[in-house]
Each structure stands twice: as structure tokens, then as C-alpha cells.
Amino acid sequence: MRGVVSVALCACAAIPAAAQAAEPGRTVFGTLPDGSKVEEVTLANGKGVIARVISWGAILRTLEVPDRAGKTADVVLGYNDLAGYLAKPKYFGASIGRYGNRIRAGRFSLDGHAYTLATNDGSNSLHGGTAGFDKKLWTITEVKGGATPSVSLRYVSPDGEEGYPGTLTVTATYTLDDTNTLTVAYRATTDKPTIVNLTNHSFFNLAGEGSGRSILDNVLTIPAERYTPVDATLIPTGEQVAVAGTPFDFRTPRVIGARIRDGRDLQIVRGRGYDHNWVVTNVPTAETHLAARVEDPESGRVLEVASNQPGVQFYAGNFLDGTAVGKSGLAYRQSDALALEPELFPDTPNQPAFGSARLDPGATYRNVIAYRFSTSPDHRTHK
């Protein structure tokens, strides 16, 4: 399928052979109101890719990536200081839990017991509630150097937090390798039955977060035959609809903004753009598979997102409203970035046809997300 095969880095983007991966740096990023220190770890691979991760929300704060000319830019939204993440978090770069995406009315049942969650998206619960994992201080448990530098973080969510049952122990490990792939591996265990759906909510702008350019001219591929339409509150209706003949058909590369600007599709109107789940596989898989590919024709940067999860939520930054001023001093506006969130389907705990979000004691939840960066030749011909 055109657009699915990885594109190798072009020679013009090469970093001098003398460059080597630096040992991870570890610094204090800021101090919380209670006096707790938030740390930042810097990972670099010697090929121009640099990732910075902070312990608040296990957030990917910066990600510097070279373009086709070898010029690097930070391609994720975020802030220069902790105050920004506390005042207007917006899920920038955050690790999301316990349940990524939406749960209808903030309610679900497990083993005959009804649970009520914190609601923070109208009547629904979104991304773990009012104080999800993105608003927690994680503990850095390990930092590794060498050819594949990494940082591991841990958070223990107590029984009943935000309404969820069971004490959930979560780890997030960021690893950077010499293929310009940043992998985020989430794992979780519980002491009693619960539900879990972890993901990463980085907002990407491949032109650079301070470029002032929107993502509407980016070219997107999602290798999925079906998607899950939503109701007026953005909860899936339960259907899995074929993408063929709809604005949701990204099986071959498509310019993102073309069908948004058309404005006639009810689903696009409901989401103010794309804010939907695509069915990439039927169930989680043992190995990762391609979930999405996005290319910025201007810079040549290409991002391929792979995961072992069955769905990917594509969000076109529809609710960025200009109130958050980011690292480059620019206000983040609608469609200034996109998110691609590999995960279980939204509202799975209330929709048995979608599978199961259950985690039992003795089992391990696992979501592995790989972000691979490359560059493409200058071929700005997509329609």
C-alpha cells in the first residue's frame, strides 16, 4: 500500500559521523507547590534526535528532529517551565491513564459492581478524569546510557483514585535508538480487577512547534478499513463503519485539511475536525504494527507511529484555542498540531463488541508505541 512502507533518511539529513550519543542528562525542571522536585532527563542519539522527558505526567516535553536539509526543530507542543504544565496542561506530551479517551457518563460496571468516575468532558470522563496520570508526579526509577539511552518512570495509582478500582502500578519507559525511533513502553499491574487503557498524548507539528504552520497541509496515511463514528458528545455509537467513500479513508496518503475544509460530513462537524478512532486491528497484538504515517511536505519530516494496540485516535488539534503559549512564545491555535494515540477503542468498558479493557491480578497490561522519524524527497504533489 502506497505510503505505508518506511522511508529511509536521505543523505542530506545525515549528521557528521563523529557525532555520538551523549549520556543522558538529568536536571531539576521545576518545583511543585508542595516542594516536590520535578526532574527532566535528556536522551540523545548522536544523529540529531534529542528527547526530553519530565517526571510530571511522564511527559515528553521536547523532541528535536532533523528535516531533509539536516536542520533540527522541536516537533512537539509543550512549555519551557513547569508553571505552563500546571496552569494549562492540555495533555501536551503526557502519559494518559487510567483510561485514555472517553468513557460515557463516567460510568462502567465490572463483575456486577457499578463504578462512577470523575467527569471532565461534559457528562463524560476523558483521559482518566480531572486528575489523571498526566497530572501526577512520577518517580524516575532508572536512566540508562549507551547506544540506546532510556529513562523509566513509575507511578502507583491507589485503589479508588478518580473512581477506578484496584491499586495500579504503572511504568513508562522512553528509549531512543540510532534509527531515529523513540519508543514509549507502558506496562501496568493491579491488585484487583480493574480497567486500563494507557497511551501517550504528544501533539506533533513536523514543521516545528514554533513554525506558525498548521498541520492541515500534512499528508496522512492510516492503514485501517474501518473507523468508529461518534455521537454528539464524541462517544462511539458502537458501529464500525467502512472508511471507503468517506472523509475517513486514509488508506492511501491524503492531505489532512482537504475534507475538513469541505465541512459537509456530520462526523467532521461533530468533532470540529478529526477526533475519531480508527480500527487498525481487531485486538491487541504481540508485536507492533503500523498505526499511522504523517509527512510534512515542506520540511520533508516523516513520522511513522507503530503500536501493538487495536485502535488509533487521530485528533487534529481542533480544540487548541490560542490560550496556551508554548515554548517558542507562540499561541497554539486550532490545527497547530495533531495527536495520534494508539490505544483501545473509546468507551470499550461499556461496549462489549469493542473487546475488553479488563486487567486482572497476575496479568500485565502492555502498550508499546514507536515513533520513527525519517525524511522524504521534495515531492509536494499529493492531492
Image (tube, helix red, strand yellow):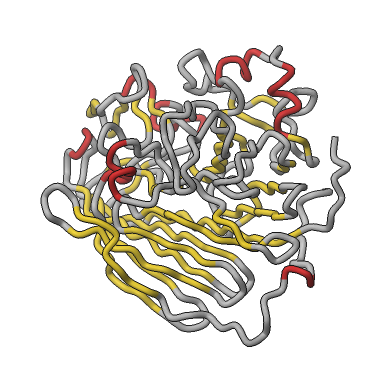
Query: Hey, which residue is sitting farthest bottom in the picture?
Result: 18
User: Is residue 199 visible to us here?
Assistant: no
Picture coordinates of residue 182, whole percent (x, y): 53, 63
Nearer to us in this view, 338 or 114: 338
Picture coordinates of residue 143, whole percent (x, y): 35, 74
Measuring 72% from the left and 52% from the top, which residue is drawn there? Answer: 299
Picture coordinates of residue 72, whole percent (x, y): 62, 62
Measuring 52% from the left and 44% from the top, which residue is drawn there? Answer: 203
Nearer to us in this view, 368 or 147: 147
Asked if residue 302 is positioned above or below residue 125 in the image, the reply reads below
The quarter in which the C terminus is drawn is top right
Asked if residue 185 is positioned above or below residue 345 in the image, the reply reads below
Question: Is residue 177 rendered to the left or right of residue 199?
Answer: right
Nearer to us in this view, 270 or 62: 62
Picture coordinates of residue 80, whole percent (x, y): 38, 52
Question: Is residue 16 rendered to the left or right of residue 106?
Answer: right
Q: Quadrant of the rendered structure where residue 55 is?
A: bottom left
Asked if residue 167 is positioned above or below residue 103 in the image, the reply reads below
Query: Hey, which residue is sitting farthest left in the picture?
Result: 34
Nearer to us in this view, 19 or 348: 19
Q: Quadrant of the rendered structure where residue 340 is?
A: top right
Question: Is residue 96 rendered to the left or right of residue 299?
Answer: left
Measuring 61% from the left and 45% from the top, which residue is drawn there? Answer: 211
Question: Is residue 2 rendered to the left or right of residue 375?
Answer: right
Say how many tags the image has: 0
User: Is residue 40 visible to us here?
Assistant: yes
Measuring 47% from the left and 59% from the top, which residue is drawn there? Answer: 184
